[in-house]
Image: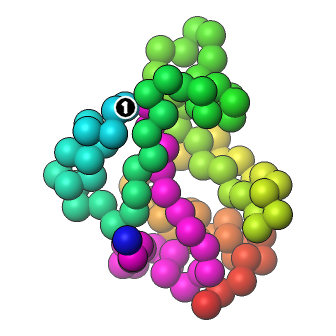
Amino acid sequence: MEIKPSSGSGLDKFDVAYFTASCDTPATNKKYAEALKLDYPILSDPRKKVAEAYGVVHEGRAVPERWTFFIGTDGKILHVDKKISTKTHGIDVSKRLTELRVPKK
């Protein structure tokens, strides 16, 4: 599947892959992605194993944290954004990619 970033965010200028992860089932995520006409994949983690490993699911929290992880090509986490604004997130991510000196296409 070809992934085309949302227009206006600037993400399409960077040489990156991006996706979201959810603790919902694949069927639920498919419906959600289709309803919102998302241009990126949603990975499903209904057993919450990956979410727990990344710390977004933890004791005292009923739903996963909404964090963004910036992971380098070497697999190392470069930055974790724990304060997400859904209204400006695409632009915020583009700014962070620039700060991290992620190559552009």
Q: Please state the horizontal and vertical placement of residue 94, each as a whole percent of the image.
A: 58, 71
Quadrant location of the N terminus? bottom left
Q: Quadrant of residue 49?
A: top right
Q: What residue range appears in magenta?
A: 2-23
Q: Please state the horizontal and vertical placement of residue 103, each as a whole percent of the image.
A: 71, 83
Q: Quadrant of residue 40?
A: bottom left
Q: Main secondary structure of the magenta part?
A: loop
Residue at horizontal 68 percent and vertical 34 percent from the top: 54
Give the amino acid at mark 1. Asp
Of the pair 83 and 5, the residue shown nearer to us: 5
Quadrant location of the C terminus? bottom right
Of the pair 2 and 100, the residue shown nearer to us: 2
| The magenta stretch spans residue 11 | yes
Mark 1 burial class by Cα count in 10 Å: few <14, some 14-19, many 20+: some
Q: Residue furthest top?
A: 60
Say what secondary structure mark 1 lies in.
loop
Quick check: 56 above or below 4? above
Q: Is residue 37 visible?
A: yes
The reply, left or right, for residue 53 in relation to residue 16 is right
Can you identify the residue that label 1 sits on?
Answer: 24
Q: Is residue 83 visible?
A: no
Residue at horizontal 20 percent and vertical 55 percent from the top: 34
The reply, left or right, for residue 25 in relation to residue 64 is left
